[in-house]
Image (cartoon, rainbow, N blue to C red):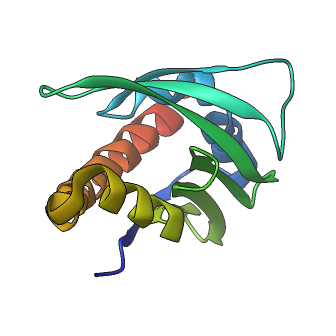
Amino acid sequence: MADWNFSESIIISRPPEALYALVSDVTRMGEWSPVCTGCWWDDDTRGVGAWFTGHNETPERTWETRSQVVADEPGREFAFIVGGDRTRWGYTFGPDAAGTELTELWEVLPAGVRHFAERYGESAEAELRQRDESARTGIHETLAALKKAAEAA
């Protein structure tokens, strides 16, 4: 089976700390994601180890996921893993002469591949290809929306 990961970067005319503040506030994710329509923290915990729930919608289905924060370094990195072990989403913030290079990363982890195999059987790879395409399109749209929101602030 293939590796299931993708990343894309964009230059945004804002400092890393300002972009980190936007991205790490998961309650705002619905403002720029084409699939996630909203998120909320599961309790008052923040930082590495904190859990939040996301509500997602596509024309085909609606679902919620729980994710755990695994990287929380202001101005450097923010990342979480869906289901605690299945899919890692992350953002890194690198200095650039024009502001910040913001990179969004997506990776299905080994437990996620196993989950797809158990749930979809012989269709697992086709399902993962569909998620891969959705991530590629979604990351591009999310970064463009983040750039627009950040530069308008």
Residue lying at 84% horizontally and 41% vertically, measured from the top left: 47
Whether residue 88 sits left or right of residue 108 in the image: it is right
> What quarter of the picture does the C terminus occupy?
top right
Q: Is residue 45 above or below residue 13?
A: above
Counting from the top left corner in percent of width and height, residue 115 is at 41, 56
Counting from the top left corner in percent of width and height, residue 34 is at 29, 33
Whether residue 135 sits left or right of residue 45 in the image: it is left
Q: Is residue 108 above or below residue 25?
A: below
Residue lying at 29% horizontally and 47% vertically, measured from the top left: 138
Residue lying at 31% horizontally and 32% vertically, measured from the top left: 35
Give the camera-side residue of 119 and 101.
Answer: 119
Q: Is residue 9 in view from this perspective? A: no
Residue lying at 62% horizontally and 62% vertically, measured from the top left: 92
- What is the residue that sits farthest to the bottom in this orientation? 2
Counting from the top left corner in percent of width and height, residue 75 is at 76, 55
Give the camera-side residue of 99 and 50.
Answer: 50
Whether residue 128 sits left or right of residue 144 in the image: it is left
Whether residue 130 sits left or right of residue 53 in the image: it is left
Q: Is residue 7 above or below residue 104?
A: below
Q: Is residue 5 in view from this perspective? A: yes
